[in-house]
Amino acid sequence: MWGQAVSRCALAFAALSAASALTAAPAATTARTQILFLGTAGGPPLRFDRSEPSTLLIVNGREYLIDCGIGTARRLIEAGVESSRIKTIFFTHLHADHDMGLADVMANDFFDGGGTGAAGPFEIYGPPQTKELVDAAFHFVSVGFRPFAAAPPTAYRMRGGSFLSPFVTHEIDHGGLVFEDGNIRVTAAENSHYAMIPALARPRFKTYSYRVETPDGVIVFSGDTGPSGSIGEIAKGADVLITEASYRDSEDLDQSIGARAARNHWSPVMTKRFRDHFVNEHLDTLQIGQIAATAGVKAVILYHYDPADDADRAAYVSGVKKNFAGPVFAPSDLDRYCLSSGAVAACGSARRR
């Protein structure tokens, strides 16, 4: 009994030490290329300590937002980042946990521009139906601004009684180069997160992984994906693979599915459908390690995960490292990583105290 207790304590201490090392802050935040995690948990449900997926890439002082889950606007405020400085947004796909925070950000941007569009234009890139999402979000936002516009004098730009939107949508319906400016070059590859959607509906529903070339190295954002060949292909030789980790292993998945099925009173058919979704359309840590090793990735950063505590967070890392020898990081919301000469390192939290 005593020996077992000591052993358990030693294991817990080792896990906590490993997890702490993952988010140490050894470097200053002056690096040219930075990755700021605004939201690190997939949804639903909403969580107290982790917002839904959203990542801010900063290159030469210019900010690019990848996905915009619920909580994004609040995290930007906590990090001291004005949303209206972010002129370019990318969506990997249009599941609700990746896009429901957009209206908050758009409202703040519109207000910051005084309704004149002065803070824009804001360029938003995403799969088919992104324009519908952006237009609907702007319509939703505009309702709250109508009373201001109705009281003269007004600076709001109107046409036919409607506000002029500073948000410009670019829908991506193919893989390949989708964006390039003086800082980054973005290539998209359709992945297998929608593998279970019937083939006839697939042209309407696309989900992408993005390979981003920066002056300091290559970063791949997996988005949500199954263990398909496309994520391994687009990740080849990347310096950093930022990847979802929806569950640790099959035992973890079975426990999670069982709990959800009991809570929601699912039928056996529904329970199997949900399990198949995770097996075919998401990644576990063992698969992540295999993909990273095969693709020759230098380092892995996890997100879209929900560790219960520091020991569990370390378990996610150790699962990846069973098949991958490089550095593996498991961030919390507002953790920042710096990329320099192809090497990534934790460089502190953006949370203002």
Image: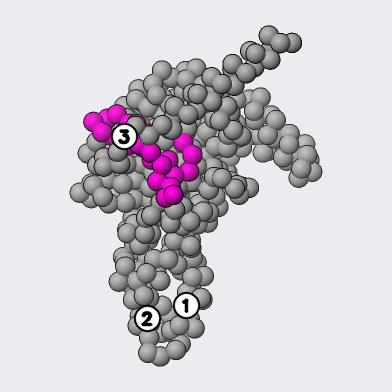
Q: Mark 1 points at which residue?
A: 145
Circle 2: residue type? Tyr
Which of the pair 353/324 is nearer the observer? 353
Residue lying at the far bottom of the rendered structure: 152
Q: Is residue 216 left or right of residue 322?
A: left
Residue 108 placement: quadrant: bottom left
As for residue 163 lying within the magenta part, the answer is no
Q: Name the residue under label 3.
A: 27
Is 121 rendered above or below residue 41? below
- For the N terminus, the quadrant is top right
> Does the magenta segment cover residue 337?
yes
Q: What range of the chain is rendered magenta? A: 331-353
The residue sitting at 72% across, 40% down in the picture is 260
Residue in the image at 53% along x and 19% along y: 14
Query: Sequence-wise, which precedes: disc 3 or disc 2?
Result: 3
Type of the residue with mark 3: Ala
Please give the label number shown on residue 156: 2
Among numbered discs 1 and 3, the one appearing first in the sequence: 3
Q: Is residue 174 visible?
A: no
| Residue at x-position 40% and y-position 46% | 350
Query: Are the residues tagged 2 and 1 within 8 Å (C-beta)?
Result: yes
Q: From this viewpoint, is residue 256 visible?
A: yes
Name which of mark 2 and mark 1 comes first in the sequence.
1
Residue 347 x %, y % = 35, 36
Mark 2 vs mark 1, CA separation in Å? 9 Å
For discs 3 and 2, the disc positioned in front in the rendered view: 3
